[in-house]
Amino acid sequence: MNEIIRLLDSVARDRNIDRELLVQDLELAMVSAARKHFNSEDPDEFGCEIDRLAGGIVLWRNNEDATREVIPLERLGRIPAQTAKQVMIQRFRENERISLLDEFSKRQGELVTGVAQRYEGNALIVQLERAEGFMPKSEQIPGEQFQAGDRVRCILLDVRDAGSQVKIVMSRAHPDFIRRLFESEVPEVAERTIEIKAMSREPGFRTKLAVSSVDSKVDAVGACVGVRGSRIRNIVDELGGEKIDIVRWNESSQVLIANALKPAEVEEVSLCFELGRATIIVRDDQLSLAIGRRGQNVRLAARLTGWDVDILTPPEFEKGLQTLQAAVKAVEGATDEMLDRMGALGMISVFDVEEIGEPSLVADCGMSEELAVRVVDACSDRAKVVAEEMQNERAAAELLQAEEGAVVDALLGTRSASGAAAPVIDAGSEAAADSILGIGGSGAG
């Protein structure tokens, strides 16, 4: 009978299940087999006990006179034995499910390494130590593909009890995946000498991190980058080339926003706490760099800092201020001091005053309620005019662009997208086209 104990020990060790639970499951399975054999519906009619050391099994029947009748196991036959087997397997699976749920729930958020198995639909199935996890498409890095047998590093994002099984959800797109990679590559981050204060990410494209050091002797940015970029390079390679910007954290929102927009150079930062908006002034040659490809740089900076970010050039900023000053000064009773206070609060255009309204002007700018109402009304009227002017400018720009496109098509004699014949070009236009393309000349043959 020692063979039973050895088998139970092996199952308990391989599946990380408490051996006592397995012994109890086996006892219940034997009771179920006895009830099946004797067609009993009484759950208390039979009992079973297994010797934890020797492995001996004692099965008995409780009689009406409170005596126990020991039942030889051989008496049960093949069908009850099959019942015991099925009950045992079911109980073992249930214990394993509970064990997996308990183990992986404690490891939620950890960095793990598995082996890619296959794709089911768009989800990647990954074999972990003793369980399968799945990575939905939403948690994968866009464009990334794994082959069967490839090593996969990811974080345990969620562990769900799905009835008969445990669903382990993994992620490579979650921002915490970046955090765990830095903890594994940068000892100072793991030791909390360097703290990742904020993070924003667009998986597969770019990530921004704001870091700070609790030790003045440790350079937070330099430690994360490593000697000649060795540390950051390992992380970028793991992410398939995703760009990572590491910026220095600052308690001042103005400084932090300027840092977050790097590599662009910021001239000035104006904060409007009422609107939760930061207006950034950059030179013309820094504008595209600050905005980034498809607005990516400014979008990530906004998420990193928690501010809505508007980027203006100095002429645009001055134009908005001048329009605001003209509208406010036209109101009787408004003073330069009030205008200065409005500027300090981040009100830099008539649209800001219209949106913020009278309460802030009364509380923070020293205006009476009547004056505040007149100032807001004046700014609202001017905002309508400015909005109409901006709309007309956009329409004119679009029209000019369309006309320029038509002229180029006419000069080059291109066909329309529908495949229609090229437009007829008069002699003057043809000569102009020849001149532009350098193919004309009085001596051409």
Image: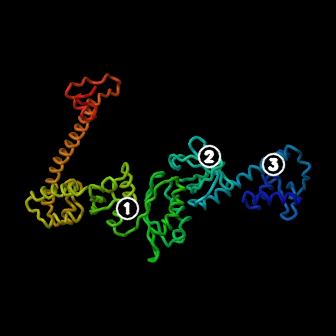
For the residue carrying disc 2, how many other residues have a C-alpha within 10 Å: few (<14), some (14-19), or many (20+)?
few
Q: Secondary structure at mark 3?
A: helix
Residue under pointer 1: 260
Res. 412 in view: yes
Which amino acid type is shown beneath numbered disc 1?
Answer: Ala
Measured as percent of width and height from the top left, residue 357 is found at 21, 57
Which disc is residue 405 wearing?
none
Which amino acid type is shown beneath numbered disc 2?
Answer: Gln
Please identify, in this view, whether the residue under mark 3 or under mark 1 is nearer the observer. 1
Foreground residue among 94 and 176: 176
Q: Secondary structure at mark 1?
A: helix
Which disc is residue 147 wearing?
2
Q: Are marks 3 and 2 in contact (CB under 8 Å)?
A: no
Sequence-wise, the earlier of marks 3 and 1 is: 3
Measured as percent of width and height from the top left, residue 25 is found at 77, 55
Q: What is the spatial separation of the Cα atoms under label 3 and label 1, in whole angstroms?
A: 63 Å
Which amino acid type is shown beneath numbered disc 3?
Answer: Lys
Displayed quadrant of residue 313: bottom left
How many numbered callouts? 3
Which disc is residue 85 wearing?
3
Foreground residue among 379 and 171: 171
Q: What is the spatial separation of the Cα atoms under label 1 and label 2, in whole angstroms?
A: 37 Å
Q: What is the spatial separation of the Cα atoms under label 3 and label 2, in whole angstroms?
A: 38 Å
For the residue carrying disc 3, how many other residues have a C-alpha within 10 Å: few (<14), some (14-19), or many (20+)?
some
Sequence-wise, the earlier of marks 1 and 2 is: 2
- What residue appears at the point 39 percent right and 56 percent down from the top-left corner? 300
Q: Quarter of the image for the C terminus: give it.
A: top left
Please identify, in this view, whether the residue under mark 3 or under mark 2 is nearer the observer. 2
Measured as percent of width and height from the top left, residue 108 is found at 58, 59
Is 40 left or right of 265, judged from the image as shown? right
